[in-house]
Image (tube, rainbow, N blue to C red):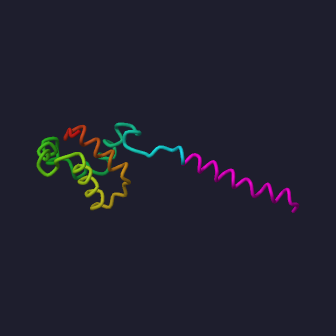
Amino acid sequence: MNQTALSHRRTVPIYLVASLALGLAFAQPASADQHDPNWGASLHEAECAGCHKTPHNAAFYESRRGKKLKSRASVFTMVQSCANYFNIAWFDEEVDAVTSYLNTKYYKYD
């Protein structure tokens, strides 16, 4: 193989790496706000609603406000704890989406 062919093969991966690095540099972090607002509701329905139906209805959730759950952060911690306990492989953005759903629908923390 001649030197020109070898030189060309070495530069292709460099351009790919540079493109990937540039894309990552300008990528914004993911959060529940960037997703469909119903994402948290669908995650809750798929993973949580099986256990959190009656007696875990609206009255149940609302009864927790100001007692065990005193802030949005404590709702996040509770959702994360449940996901960990039941081996639900969620990233923080999924936990945050469910937290946002529960907070918007039931808890109403700022």
Residue 42 sits in which quadrant?
A: top left
Q: Which residue occupies 77% across, 57% down?
A: 9
> What percent of the width, then of the height, locates residue 63?
11, 45
Q: Which residue occupies 19% across, 41% down?
A: 107
Above or below residue 87? Residue 95 is above
**How many marks are shown on the rendered structure?**
0
Q: Quadrant of the C terminus?
A: top left
Magenta range: 1-24
Indicate whether residue 109 is drawn in magenta: no
> What percent of the width, then of the height, locates residue 82?
26, 57
Q: Which residue occupies 31% across, 41% down?
A: 41
Residue 11 sits in which quadrant?
A: bottom right
Q: Nearer the viewer, residue 21 or 104?
A: 21
Q: Which residue occupies 23% across, 49% down?
A: 75
Q: Is residue 88 left or right of residue 72?
A: right
Q: Main secondary structure of the magenta part?
A: helix
Indicate whether residue 11 is drawn in magenta: yes
Q: Is residue 28 left or right of residue 88?
A: right
Q: Nearer the viewer, residue 101 or 31?
A: 31
Residue 91 sits in which quadrant?
A: bottom left
